[in-house]
Amino acid sequence: MPNSLLPRSRAPETPDSNPLGGVRSTYPGPRAQISRDANLTWWRRILPIISSHRLTFVASIVLSFVSLILQTLVPYLLNGAITHALQKHNASLHRAVVEIVVVGALAGVTGILSRQYLYRTAYEVEADLRSLIYEHLTWLSFSFYDRVQSGQLISRANSDIRSVQMYSTFAPLILVQTSIGVLAFGFMLKIDPLLACIAMVVMPILYVVGIKMRRVLFPISWITQSRLADVATIVDENVNGVRVVKSFAQEEAEINRLADAAERVAWAYVKDAQIRGQWSPWLQNLPQLGLALVLAFGGFMVINGKLGVGAILAFNAYLLMLQAPFMMLGQLVMMGQRAKASAERIFEILDEHPEVIERPGAYDLVDVEGSLDFDHVRFGYGPDVEILQDFNLRISAGETVALVGRTGSGKSTVARLATRFYDTTEGAVRVDGHDVRDVTMASLRQNVGVVLDEPFLFSVSVGENIAYGVPGATYVAIEAAARAAAAHDFIMDLPDGYDTVIGERGYTLSGGQRQRIAIARTLLVNPPILILDDATSAVDVHVESTIYDALTTLMASRTTLVIAHRISTIALARRVILLEDGRVVADGTHEQLLATSGLYAEILAQTIVEDL
Ligand SMILES: Nc1ncnc2c1ncn2[C@@H]1O[C@H](COP(=O)(O)OP(=O)(O)OP(=O)(O)O)[C@@H](O)[C@H]1O
Ligand SMILES: [Mg+2]
């Protein structure tokens, strides 16, 4: 169903946690939220999410611990077997083999289980973080989206979620592995303390080399990430903006732009490979040096009869076992730095508060008659520019009013304030005398329907698009709404009628067809107050008058605010309001304004020229 396209908000837990409190959904959401206390360190803020999966997480850590202990036991048993069964002949070889096989198998099984639990935790944590972010994004107000590039934001959020998830679930595992190194060292000490110390000589060097390599690799991997994001942005713009690119014949320039960006990515990858090429041989071969030392000193001891051959084999196995944790320990530091930066970017989004929120105790608007009142309204999108200055307008229930003004005079702004997309700086907007800030947002938007000038359609069927606000509407209702919007006839001409799937953003339809579907979508909700913001600008005059005829006859009791440029549309309203410099400068019938207002005549003269 269409409502599955966008996540809807959950039921509120605290009054300010969900500004769309009126909308209920069956989506259960993540099991926990991040800590709201911005003073905590980043991992303490993430902790509630991890601890909501503590069962699988702790299980995976414990199992991994068990598995590693069993693994460390194997070389020890091997040493005993070689010494006692092969050299001294005072123990059974058969028994030793069985012991090693059983311990090895148990280590394998616990290892598999630990990994399964760990991956489950990791991906559940990732899913939780993702839903938290997307859910939060749907709560944020319009003003947030005015400020940010939402596409960039979402793609960035994805890689940040991944790096936080990796660190918070895998870091504890690496620490467990390192702690096992202590156990392995203990076994080595037990076999021979001196040789244990000699064998460990290269480990600190391995750690230092690991750290050094990450330190030079780290900036490069950041550069690679950001350059990959640049490529993604260019590809995204070229796909979404393909019509603009082609119409200005800029294909070649775009190809060059992409090639440049791709080259920059290639440079970063080559640099990365060079650094790895320089450092990796050290990391791979240092442990061999350790093995050589063990062979030299241990071999000497064996020749002098002070050590069994088995000990050399066991040391060999331990050194290989220790190699990984020592290298990873260096990696852990870098992963931690990256996770911290990522977590901070995630918090930047999650700490963003919606500016338009529902008041505690907000009530539902019911039985709306349809009066709309702007009372001494002041408003600006930012603190610097004031768009509406002492804007006063009272529209009675059932009235049809046209709002006219120069482009950029603030007409759409008036529509956005009536639906509370933004809050006024001063003054109030009232529906039936109720301040829009006192009522639930869902009920307000059910009662004040707005058709925007840029209709956005989803890539689902025409019918589902019309039913977007009323999921589960009957076919009869959908058709009635489409007829009122003068859309039924062209929809029936589409290949599958109401089941025709619309191409992305409705590009398979004409501008006027998209507008009519958008009108039908709002009419289906049947709001007592209807605002049409340039909603018929792409429809021809004849179809437009059909739509307005239908509107007037179908719902005579509806309050309608029409924002229009065309004289034919304006003339449909009995009352016309002229907006200039954020104020109402004229209010009357079309004829009255024409006779008294020079500005009105001027604006209309321009639109007539445009119409021609
Ligand atoms: N989201 C926004 N953020 C900042 N400024 C905005 C925003 N939307 C509009 N404005 C500014 O507010 C002013 C009024 O814009 P508005 O869209 O209300 O004009 P309009 O009367 O609807 O114009 P048009 O007839 O061209 O549709 C303009 O100067 C515009 O630049
Ligand atoms: Mg506008």
Image: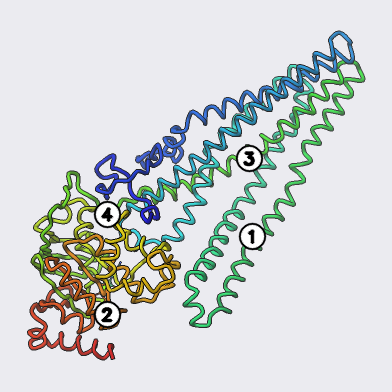
> Whole-percent x and y of residue 262?
62, 66
| Separation (CA) of disc 2 from disc 1 | 57 Å
The quadrant holding residue 309 is top right
Q: Find numbered disc 3 in the image and state the secondary structure of the residue it sits on.
A: helix
Labels 2, 1: front one = 2
Residue 198 placed where, x, y %? Answer: 78, 27
Task: Mark 1 vs mark 3: give the one in front.
Answer: 1
Q: In which quarter of the image is ligand 2?
A: bottom left
Q: Name the kind of residue labelled 2 in the image.
A: Val
Q: Name the residue under label 4.
A: 355
Tell me the CA gap for discs 1 and 3: 22 Å
User: Which quarter of the rendered picture does the N terminus lie within?
Assistant: bottom left
Per the image, the residue denoted by label 3 is 330
Mark 1 Cα shell of 10 Å, populated few (<14), some (14-19), many (≥20): many
What number is the disc on residue 268?
Answer: 1
Identify residue for label 2: 543
Which residue is located at x 62 percent, y 48 percent? Answer: 215
How many dots with numbers?
4
Residue type highlighted by circle 3: Gly
2 or 3: tag closer to the N-terminus? 3
Q: Which residue lies furthest to the right in this view?
A: 303
| Vertical position of residue 27 compared to residue 426: above or below | above
